[in-house]
Structures are given as structure tokens and as C-alpha cells.
Image (cartoon, rainbow, N blue to C red):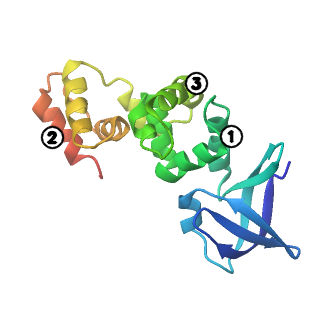
């Protein structure tokens, strides 16, 4: 297994880089978030995963070990291969993905190219328990958020294009009154989305 490669970025493509190390060029597929953080000529350490098939050896790379860990969790889910996992990591930030899994927000995950709702739901079911201790702190307070008014407000916010994970993150930032009505909760979600 190749754990990491340290070298110089000699080329950046749409979905991959060529990393030069000891006069050899390694083609490494990467999520777009990682690609955007690199420039040609930059010295970097790329955490890698080698995917082996009968007729192909492919390297997948990440700028952080956390991304690599998530990638390996994703490809362990039946129905998600390395390319699908890369699409998910290109579409959703690592923090949002953890929150989406922890909150059961399969809709947000299914927005990734090539990932259907059923596959996203399977991913949530398979990985939900993995993030009990790793979910960002702001989500921990949202675990207690429940009730029909909150659920109704979240459903409304989702209809406007906001994900369940984003709603929960927004609500976790505040102390929600127990008698808050739906309109108040909706206002609080929108006010705290980007705070």
C-alpha cells in the first residue's frame, strides 16, 4: 500500500494531478476541494489510497488524512466505488458530510453526481454509528432538537433548498425555546445559517 507521496505538482487536470517524485510522475485522482487548494510547482504531501482491479491500478489522493479516512469509509459501503466516493467528497465538505450522515440527511448526499437516494440512504445507515464521537460540536446540541414544530420548520427549509444538516447546524447555535412556533423556528434557521 502507498500511504502517501511527497513531491511537486507538475500538472493539475479537471479531476487529477500529476505529482512528480524522484523523476516519476504519479497520476492521482482527487476531490475538487483538494485540487483547488493546489498550484503547479507546489511541494505537497498527498495521502493516498491505491485501488486495485484486475485490469487497473488507480491512485486516489487527499490533502488531509481526515479526507482519506472518510474516502475509505465511503468505499466500504456497498454500491459506492472510488469514483462515487470522490464525487461525494467533491460535492460536500467533510464537515457537512459528517453532519449529513449523523443527522440522516440522505437528500444532501444524493445531490452528488452519480449517487442516487437509495445509495445515499444505505450510506447513512451503514456509517451513522461511526460519527457519534466525531460529529462537530455544534451538532451535539442539535441531537436534542425534536418535536413536530421543529420537524415542520426543517421540512419547509428543505423545500427552499437548505439541507437538513444545515438546518440542524443553524439550530444548534441557539437555545431554542420549547414553545417556539413553526414560523419562529424557520426565522431562526434562516438567521443562523451562515453565522
Instruction: Identify residue for label 2.
Output: 187
- The foreground one among 176 and 112 is 112
- The foreground one among 130 and 23 is 23
Residue at image position (75%, 70%) is 19
N-terminal label among 1 and 3: 1
* Image position of 152 with respect to 191: above or below: above
Q: Is residue 132 visible?
A: no
* Image position of 153 with respect to 36: above or below: above
Is 27 on the left-hand or right-hand side of 107? right
C-beta proximity under 8 Å, tags 3 and 2:
no
Is 116 on the left-hand or right-hand side of 130? left
Residue at image position (66%, 44%) is 82
Provide residue 184's location: percent of width, then percent of height.
Answer: 12, 34
Instruction: Identify residue for label 1.
Output: 72
Provide residue 119's location: percent of width, then percent of height.
Answer: 52, 30
N-terminal label among 3 and 2: 3
Instruction: Identify residue for label 3.
Output: 126
Cα distance, mark 2 to mark 1? 38 Å
- Which structural element holds mark 3? helix
- The foreground one among 104 and 175 is 104
Q: Is residue 57 visible?
A: yes
Provide residue 162's location: percent of width, then percent of height.
Answer: 29, 42
Amino acid at each position: 500500500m502507498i500511504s502517501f507521496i511527497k513531491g511537486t505538482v507538475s500538472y493539475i487536470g479537471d479531476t487529477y494531478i500529476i505529482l512528480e517524485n524522484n523523476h516519476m510522475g504519479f497520476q492521482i485522482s482527487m476531490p475538487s476541494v483538494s485540487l483547488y487548494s493546489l498550484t503547479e510547482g507546489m511541494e505537497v504531501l498527498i495521502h493516498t489510497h491505491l485501488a486495485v482491479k484486475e485490469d487497473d491500478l488507480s491512485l486516489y489522493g487527499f490533502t488531509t488524512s481526515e479526507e482519506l479516512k472518510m474516502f475509505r469509509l465511503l468505499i466500504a459501503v456497498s454500491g459506492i466505488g472510488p469514483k462515487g466516493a470522490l464525487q461525494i467528497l467533491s460535492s460536500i465538505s467533510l464537515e457537512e458530510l459528517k453532519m449529513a450522515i449523523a443527522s440522516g440527511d440522505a437528500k444532501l448526499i444524493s445531490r452528488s453526481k452519480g449517487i442516487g437516494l437509495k445509495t445515499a440512504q444505505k450510506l447513512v445507515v451503514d456509517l451513522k454509528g461511526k460519527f457519534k464521537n466525531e460529529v462537530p460540536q455544534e451538532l451535539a446540541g442539535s441531537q436534542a432538537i425534536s418535536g413536530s414544530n421543529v420537524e415542520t420548520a426543517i421540512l419547509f427549509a428543505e423545500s427552499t433548498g437548505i439541507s437538513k444538516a444545515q438546518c440542524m447546524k443553524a439550530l444548534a447555535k441557539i437555545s431554542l425555546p420549547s414553545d417556539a412556533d413553526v414560523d419562529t423556528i424557520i426565522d431562526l434557521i434562516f438567521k443562523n445559517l451562515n453565522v
